[in-house]
Image: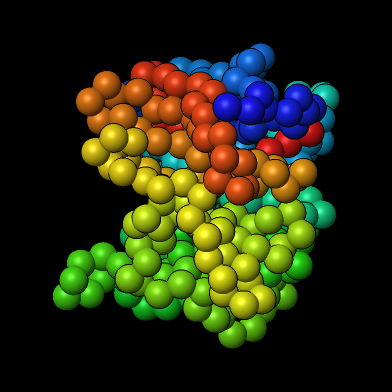
């Protein structure tokens, strides 16, 4: 087995706790060393997801917190910008506006997220939020379906899951739409069982977790290659949280994913080379379910 290449890159990830308000955000080196907490939970506030390009630049954080409703307190998920150098928080949407976990655009000025259609609805839309003005615009909506797991490419495209119910049960399709708006196209049909995706740094390929495991697709011609064959009986389960789940190194040579071992209750963080060589577990925990965000500097 080859030794992992040393790099300054780190993997940003969350652990969704087994109890309320036990959600953390961490970063770790790709060799599994130097685990660092970035955001630690508080009695009425925890941190479900964070999106960043650098740990020194502003971070888009999905905060799970107690908020004041019209008549009493309630628990809600809200989007904030966190500036780690000065430890300042800024809410990016009004408290009354439906929100959901977000992913930063390549330039860091926008975010793509999947707000509920209404406060109590399970259906979600795909929207882009301008972080400078707080204004959002809808990219995709469809009655009877949900939108989950958006990812943003340097090419200006956004991939997302369309989740819909059929006589065969709940199905997913991988879709893609220009960030400025337009007609979505289907990248993968429902029979592939795709649950999340991430683009390569140059946006020429996309890595997807399907019913087979981790696959890489060349976007120009649709050529596919399996880089991690998944055996649920041995490897455990891959669960999507509707955001994140896969991350591709900015150097382009490694992909990170997480597996949950049902028998032991441990959530494991894995890294594999893009060629499918040297798959390795670099971290595990029983304190929460790992949700991967991205590679950061």
On the image, the x and y values in percent for residue 294 come to: 64, 41
Please tell me which residue is depicted at 60% across the width and 20% down the height of the picture.
32
- The residue furthest top is 34
Q: Quadrant of the C terminus?
A: top right
| Image label count | 0
217 shown above or below 286: below
Please tell me which residue is depicted at 56% across the width and 34% down the height of the picture.
278
91 shown above or below 83: below
Q: Is residue 91 visible from the viewing direction of this image? A: no
Q: Quadrant of residue 261?
A: top left
- 216 or 99, nearer to the observer: 216
Q: Is 24 situated left or right of 219 in this image?
A: left
On the image, the x and y values in percent for residue 166 come to: 22, 75
177 shown above or below 90: below
- 76 or 6, nearer to the observer: 6
Q: Quadrant of the N terminus?
A: top right
Q: Quadrant of residue 194?
A: bottom left
Q: Is residue 289 visible from the viewing direction of this image? A: yes
- 76 or 36, nearer to the observer: 36
Please tell me which residue is depicted at 64% across the width and 32% down the height of the picture.
11
- The residue furthest bottom is 183
- 281 or 268, nearer to the observer: 281
Please tell me which residue is depicted at 66% across the width and 76% down the height of the picture.
220
Q: Quadrant of residue 219?
A: bottom right
């Amino acid at each position: 087995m080859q030794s992992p290449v040393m790099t300054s890159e780190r993997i940003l990830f969350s652990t969704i706790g087994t109890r309320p308000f036990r959600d953390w955000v961490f970063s770790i080196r790709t060799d599994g060393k130097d685990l660092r907490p970035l955001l630690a939970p508080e009695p009425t506030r925890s941190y479900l997801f964070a999106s960043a390009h650098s740990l020194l630049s502003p971070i888009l954080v999905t905060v799970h917190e107690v908020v004041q409703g019209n008549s009493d307190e309630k628990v809600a998920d809200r989007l904030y910008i966190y500036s780690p150098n000065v430890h300042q928080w800024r809410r990016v949407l009004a408290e009354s506006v439906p929100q959901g976990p977000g992913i930063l655009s390549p330039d860091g000025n926008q975010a793509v997220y999947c707000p509920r259609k209404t406060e109590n609805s399970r259906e979600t839309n795909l929207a882009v939020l301008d972080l400078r003005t707080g204004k959002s615009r809808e990219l995709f909506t469809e009655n009877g379906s949900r939108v989950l797991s958006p990812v943003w490419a340097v090419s200006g495209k956004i991939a997302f899951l369309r989740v819909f119910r059929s006589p065969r049960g709940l199905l997913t399709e991988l879709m893609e739409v220009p960030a400025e708006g337009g007609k979505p196209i289907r990248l993968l049909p429902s029979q592939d069982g795709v649950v999340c995706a991430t683009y390569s740094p140059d946006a020429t390929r996309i890595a997807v977790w399907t019913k087979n495991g981790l696959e890489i697709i060349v976007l120009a011609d649709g050529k596919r290659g399996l880089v991690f064959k998944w055996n649920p009986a041995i490897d455990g389960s891959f669960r999507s949280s509707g955001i994140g789940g896969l991350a591709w190194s900015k150097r382009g040579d490694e992909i990170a994913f997480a597996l949950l071992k049902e028998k032991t209750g441990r959530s494991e963080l894995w890294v594999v080379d893009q060629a499918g060589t040297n798959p390795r577990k670099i971290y595990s925990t029983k304190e929460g379910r790992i949700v991967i965000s991205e590679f950061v500097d």
